[in-house]
Image (tube, helix red, strand yellow):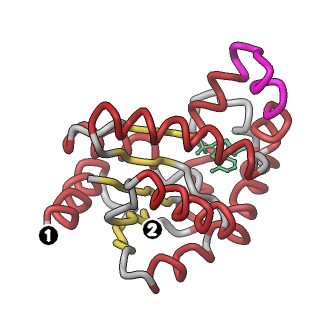
Amino acid sequence: MRLLLLAPPGAGKGTQARRISEHFGIPHISTGELFRQHVAEGDELGKSVQAYVEGGDLVPDDVVLAIVRQAVEEAMNSSSGYLLDGFPRNLHQAREGAHLAKQLGASADAVLHLEVGEDELLRRLLGRTEGRVDDNEATIRHRLEVYRTQTVPLLDYYRGRGLLININGEQPVDDVTSEAIKALDA
Ligand code: AMP
């Protein structure tokens, strides 16, 4: 199973990604997690992406695509599947990602979209205590804006390709997971 997971900040993307990838026994690739690890290690890549991650801006596409290529290659070698959490975030990444996946024989089978209304997102984000450096109010509002302008156009892109599966992300966490698994099994 090869999956992409699209969701706005605060929709429970990381939690659902962990559960769904575990259920299907496929590697969970979170681009945000990978970037945060590099930032924490203070290596070259980390230094080059730190300001973007902390400000809630998108990391440049060439950097993202390089890290995704490596992670997908590793996933395909170890399990022939993957769940990509947080990629793609804009149309250019989607097109380049599809091209790359084709080359690797790793095209996505489905794109899961967790739907959560903006009021609910703000309520959750402003109340959460994960202590991420991008979790202050100004950055949260900026990340929502980036999602709306850059990432939302991907919904039409994937709908047009017959890949999009919408899941109601406002339900209790367990119900979101089971709705997603049920839709994927079908
Ligand atoms: P996330 O954990 O998915 O919310 O990602 C956290 C941050 O990592 C984002 O706000 C971006 O700065 C960066 N990031 C993660 N994935 C991508 C991507 N596909 N393209 C550009 N930036 C990304």
Q: Is residue 63 left or right of residue 176?
A: right
Was residue 106 drawn as part of the magenta stretch in this picture?
Answer: no
Residue drawn at 70 percent across, 38 percent down: 135
Mark 2 and mark 1 lie on one chain; the one further toward the N terminus is: 2
Taking 49 as reference, is 114 above or below it?
below
Question: Which residue type carries mark 1?
Answer: Ala
Question: Is 6 left or right of 125, judged from the image as shown?
Answer: left
Q: List the residue tagged with mark 1.
A: 186
**SS at badge 1:** loop
What's the amino acid at mark 2? Answer: Glu
The Cα–Cα distance between marks 2 and 1, rounded to whole angstroms, is: 19 Å
Query: Residue, x 65% and y 41% (percent of image)?
Result: 66
Q: Residue at x 48, y 65 (%)?
A: 116
Residue at the spot 56% in from the left edge and 59% down from the top edge: 97
Prevailing secondary structure of the magenta residues: helix
Q: How many marks?
A: 2
Kindly identify which numbered label has been placed on residue 106: none
- Look at the image and give the residue range highlighted in magenta: 39-49
Examine the rendered structure and indicate whether residue 94 appears above or below residue 12. Answer: below
Q: Which residue is mark 2?
A: 115
Image position, residue 14 (x, y; %): 45, 42
Horizontal and vertical percent position of residue 160: 46, 86
**In the image, farthest residue toward the bottom:** 160
Mark 2 touches mark 1? (CB < 8 Å): no
Residue 124 in percent (x, y) is at 54, 49
Q: Quadrant of residue 22?
A: top left
Q: Note whether 151 is above or below 11 in the view shown.
A: below
